[in-house]
Image (spheres, rainbow, N blue to C red):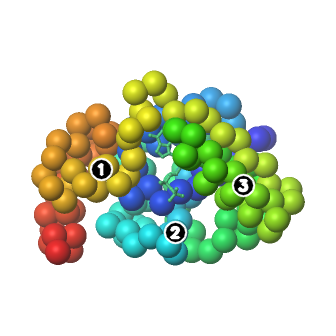
Amino acid sequence: MKAAVYPGSFDPVTVGHIDIIKRASKIFDRVIVLVMTNTAKSTMFTEAERVDFIQKAVSCPNVEAEAYDGLLADYCREKGVYITVRGLRQTIDFEYEYQIAQVNRYLEPEIETVLLYAADGHGFISSSVAREMITRGGNLRNIVPDGIIEYIEKINNGGKNNG
Ligand code: ADP
C-alpha cells in the first residue's frame, strides 16, 4: 500500500490545498494531511482547529488529518511513510519547496517529495489571503471550502482571533 504525507500549516485549509489533497488521494492509497506548526510563522488557528477544518472539508475515505509537533523527518520514520506531497504555485514556491525537500532528505535520505502543480485559477490562493479576508471581513467564497466558511467565521468571532 502506497501512503503519502501532505504536510503544511493549513492556517486555514484553502480550496488550493483541498485540490492537492483530492489529487493526491487518487495517486496514493492513503494520504495523511499533517498539520504542522512552522516555527517561523505564528498561526491564527490552533492545531486542533486546523485539523478540524480539514476533517470537515474532506470526505475522501483514504484521507486522514492529524497534527504533529516535530520534524517531518521524524514523523516519516515513526510512521514508515517516506513520500511527501507538496503543492507548487508560482516559481517563487519552487525555491522554497526545493529547500524544504533538501532539508528533509538531509535529515532522512529515504524521503521523496512529490510536487503537484496548483490547479488553474488557484495560483493566488493561499492561507494568508484567507486570513486577510477573515481579519478584514472579506468574502471567503472560492478561497476556503464552502462547507467550512461559517464554521471558520464562528470560531473567529469567538473572540480569540479578533485582537
Ligand atoms: P507551509 O507553511 O508549510 O508552506 P501551507 O499550508 O502554506 O504550509 O502550504 C502547504 C503546501 O500547500 C505547500 O506546499 C504550498 O506550496 C501548497 N499550497 C498552498 N496553497 C496552494 C494552492 N493554492 N494550490 C496548490 N498548492 C498550494
Q: CA distance from mark 2 to mark 3?
A: 15 Å
Question: Do the CB atoms of the residues marked 1 and 2 lie less than 8 Å apart?
Answer: no
Residue 8 percent across, percent down from the top left: 53, 57
Q: Give the percent coordinates (x, y) of residue 122.
A: 42, 33
| Residue under numbered circle 3 | 101
Dot 1 falls on a residue whose secondary structure is helix
Kind of residue indicated by mark 2: Asn
The residue type indicated by label 3 comes to Ala
Tell me if I can see residue 122 in this picture: yes
Label whose residue precedes the other's in the sequence (1 or 3): 3
Q: Residue 48 in the image: state x and y as whole percent.
A: 40, 67
Identify the residue shown where x is 25% and y is 55%: 132
Gap between marks 1 and 2 measured at Cα: 17 Å
Disc 1 designates what residue?
Answer: 130
Q: Is residue 14 above or below residue 108?
A: above
* Badge 2 density bin: few <14, some 14–19, many ≥20, Cα 10 Å: few
Label 2, on which residue?
38
Q: Is residue 61 above or below residue 42?
A: above
**Are the residues flagged by discs 1 and 3 in contact, CB closer than 8 Å?**
no
Q: Within the image, what quadrant is residue 154 found in?
A: bottom left
Amino acid type at circle 1 is Ala
Q: Residues within 10 Å of mark 1 (few under 14, many from 20)?
A: many
Residue 135: quadrant of the picture? bottom left
Left or right of 2? Residue 89 is left
Within 8 Å of ligand 1, the CB of disc 2? yes
